[in-house]
Image (spheres, coloured by chain):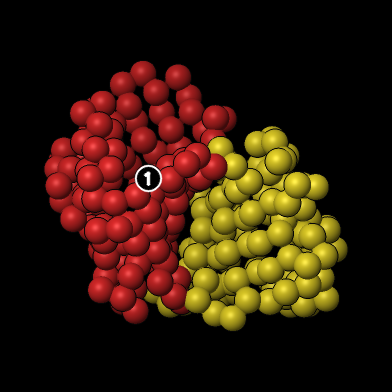
Chain colours: A yellow, B red
Amino acid sequence: MPTQDHMKQALQTYIDAFNAGDAQAVVALYADDAVIEDPVGNPPITGRAAIEEFYTNAIAGGAKLALDAPIRGSHGDRAAMAFTVDVPGMRIRAIDVMTFGPGGEIVRMEAHWGPDDIET
Amino acid sequence: MPTQDHMKQALQTYIDAFNAGDAQAVVALYADDAVIEDPVGNPPITGRAAIEEFYTNAIAGGAKLALDAPIRGSHGDRAAMAFTVDVPGMRIRAIDVMTFGPGGEIVRMEAHWGPDDIET
């Protein structure tokens, strides 16, 4: 199981790489067959090609991420973070939960935000 | 599926009832056969009697909860919140994810906090 330090650093890298516009560095955090459910309740996307498209589009849309509070770990294979997404003309408040595989890659990401968590 | 308003109000009631020392009101948010994994990675507890004991002990220990950021919903049956637990001599930073049943009760609670999320 990955260490707490590893998981928290991966989430911080996620934020930093996203804000640097480096979709490749974000995608590199994921396992090849990872699943993203963003938002929770919508159909998930699976696999590296779909995940790369997802982040390339999000970054191209001008989104920037800011942590609302320190990243949390767990006593298992998960870490979580509350953050705000600022897109031109829109703000989304989200909580992402990442599950890690034994090799330290993210195998599942679940993003909790609803219609009421968007401000325009 | 419960509404966003219902789920967010349930999480706010959770915080308020906990801080008021009202374990019964917290437990009443749960389904009879609900599962609590707190923290994620430890064995879960199941059912009303175990859940009541869990909250009675937590409240008796003097814990108080404060939201770090607004409660998040989802596009499904989940809501999440980042908060800080202040216990005498200890502070824990947690992110809880609650899954709701069709009747509006919480059927699963998963608390994300690790050994590094405790300050003494």
Q: Tell me which corner region of the image, top left, top right, bottom left or bottom right, holds residue A46.
A: bottom right
Instruction: Say how many tags the image has.
Output: 1
- Locate residue B71, reporting x and y percent: 38, 59
Above or below: residue B34 compared with residue B50: below
Above or below: residue A58 compared with residue B21: below
Q: Residue at x 54, y 30 (%)?
A: B115
How packed mark 1 is, by other alpha carbons closer than 10 Å (few <14, some 14-19, many 20 or more), is: some
Above or below: residue B56 compared with residue B12: above
Q: Residue at x 36, y 35 (%)?
A: B85
> On the image, numbered disc 1 is attached to which residue?
B45
Q: Tell me which corner region of the image, top left, top right, bottom left or bottom right, holds residue A117.
A: bottom left
Q: Specify the subunit that label 1 lies on.
A: B
Q: Residue at x 51, y 58 (%)?
A: A95
Give A63 or B76, whichever is nearer the viewer: B76
Q: Is disc 1 placed on a helix, strand or loop?
A: strand
- Locate residue B28, reporting x and y percent: 18, 55
Asked whether, in this view, residue A107 is left or right of residue B53, the answer is right
- Locate residue A52, reporting x and y percent: 80, 72
Give B89 or A19, whichever is nearer the viewer: B89
Q: Residue at x 69, y 51 (%)?
A: A100
Give B16 or A109, whichever is nearer the viewer: A109
User: Is residue A82 in sight in this rendering?
Assistant: yes
Q: Quadrant of the C terminus of chain B?
A: top left
- Amino acid type of the residue that numbered disc 1 sits on in the rendered structure: Ile
Q: Quadrant of the N terminus of chain B?
A: bottom left
- Locate residue A93, reporting x and y percent: 49, 63
User: Is residue A17 in sight in this rendering?
Assistant: no
Q: Tell me which corner region of the image, top left, top right, bottom left or bottom right, holds residue A99.
A: bottom right
